[in-house]
């Protein structure tokens, strides 16, 4: 009877997109990943490949990463056409090599979107997300000592729903998996999160208008609600958020028009 210690190392062939910078032409380059432990994470496997490339005098494969715990949202690229790889609800750094077979060929390429320009290889610029967040502005809050958390009147269903929306880590998988490169899931999660909480009520309308406007300015595509974004999201953010964002935007637009016309909508 086999045990966990009997796991055999595997050999893989990687076809990696290499591109010097955003202005250069790119191409796929083949690398061998040999004697990879099934318990290694995908990024640990790439670390090993990069060590061999460097020893041979080559340039290592560039990819973004930070916490390697599925929290920061830094890592992210396409693995065999899937954002973050084949395992649902998992970031690249949490994807383990036991999900691949010995002798398998794996294709790696960057997230493809106009709003995510390539910096190098698998590394793209996702600061468009930061600008959407910045467009949302701050929240207004009374100064002084912070109130006791239990004293803040937030119904538990609202708190739970806000938490699910706040789980978004801004990795960009939603954009990369969408045929229109839409950022609707990301933006809607941020809008919904604060719209549900008392702290976000004061700037609720302006936040929705400004964040949606910034999303369009950045060059993200329109949402056609196919659901590919939610399916690829490592935190499984619900598609319902997009419907809520549309409602928040419509509500804010009507209120703004009412203010402009003195309440006369005729």
Image (tube, grey):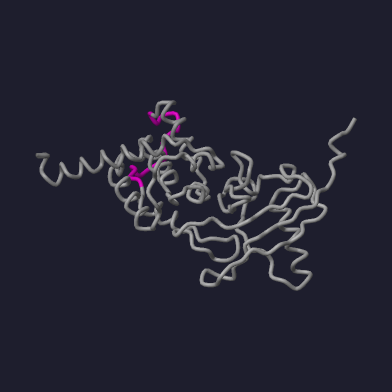
- Where does the image place residue 1, in percent across and percent down from the top left? 90, 30
Closer to us: 76 or 13: 13
How would you classify the magenta stretch by its main secondary structure? loop
- Image quadrant occupied by the C terminus: top left
As drawn, 78 above or below 155: below
**Residue located at (47% from left, 57% from top):** 113
Q: How many numbered discs?
A: 0
As drawn, the residue found furthest toward the top would be: 156
As drawn, the residue found furthest toward the right would be: 1
**Residue located at (53% from left, 48% from top):** 173
As drawn, 196 above or below 44: above
- Where does the image place residue 80, in percent across and percent down from the top left? 63, 50
On screen, residue 251 versus residue 166, left or right, reads: left
Closer to us: 243 or 189: 243
On screen, residue 31 versus residue 121, left or right, reads: right
Magenta span contains residue 155: no
Magenta span contains residue 147: yes
Give, as a single range, the part of the protein colored magenta: 139-153
Residue 254 position by quadrant: top left
Residue 6 position by quadrant: top right
- Where does the image place residue 4, in percent across and percent down from the top left? 84, 36
- Where does the image place residue 19, in percent across and percent down from the top left? 59, 67
Closer to us: 110 or 205: 110
On screen, residue 74 versus residue 186, left or right, reads: right
**Residue located at (34% from left, 49% from top):** 212
**Residue located at (44% from left, 31% from top):** 159
């Amino acid at each position: 009877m086999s045990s966990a210690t009997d796991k055999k190392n595997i050999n893989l062939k990687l076809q990696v997109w290499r591109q010097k910078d955003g202005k250069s032409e790119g191409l796929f380059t083949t690398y061998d990943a040999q004697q990879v432990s099934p318990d290694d994470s995908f990024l640990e496997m790439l670390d090993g490949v990069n060590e061999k490339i460097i020893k041979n005098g080559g340039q290592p494969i560039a990819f973004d990463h930070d916490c390697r715990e599925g929290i920061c949202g830094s890592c992210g690229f396409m693995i065999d056409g899937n954002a973050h790889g084949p395992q649902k609800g998992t970031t690249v750094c949490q994807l383990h090599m036991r999900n691949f077979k010995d002798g398998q060929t794996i294709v790696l390429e960057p997230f493809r979107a106009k709003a995510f320009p390539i910096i190098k290889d698998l590394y793209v610029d996702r600061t468009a997300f930061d600008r959407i967040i910045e467009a949302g502005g701050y929240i207004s809050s009374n100064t002084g000592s912070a109130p006791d958390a239990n004293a803040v009147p937030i119904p538990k269903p609202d708190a739970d729903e806000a938490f699910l929306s706040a789980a978004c880590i801004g990795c960009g998988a939603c954009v990369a998996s969408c045929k229109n490169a839409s950022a609707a899931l990301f933006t809607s999660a941020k809008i919904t999160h604060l719209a549900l909480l008392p702290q976000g009520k004061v700037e609720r309308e302006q936040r929705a208008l400004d964040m949606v406007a910034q999303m369009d300015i950045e060059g993200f595509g329109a949402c056609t609600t196919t659901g590919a974004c939610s399916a690829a999201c490592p935190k499984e953010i619900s598609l319902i958020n997009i419907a809520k964002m549309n409602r928040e935007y419509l509500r804010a637009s009507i209120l703004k028009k009412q203010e402009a016309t003195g309440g006369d909508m005729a």
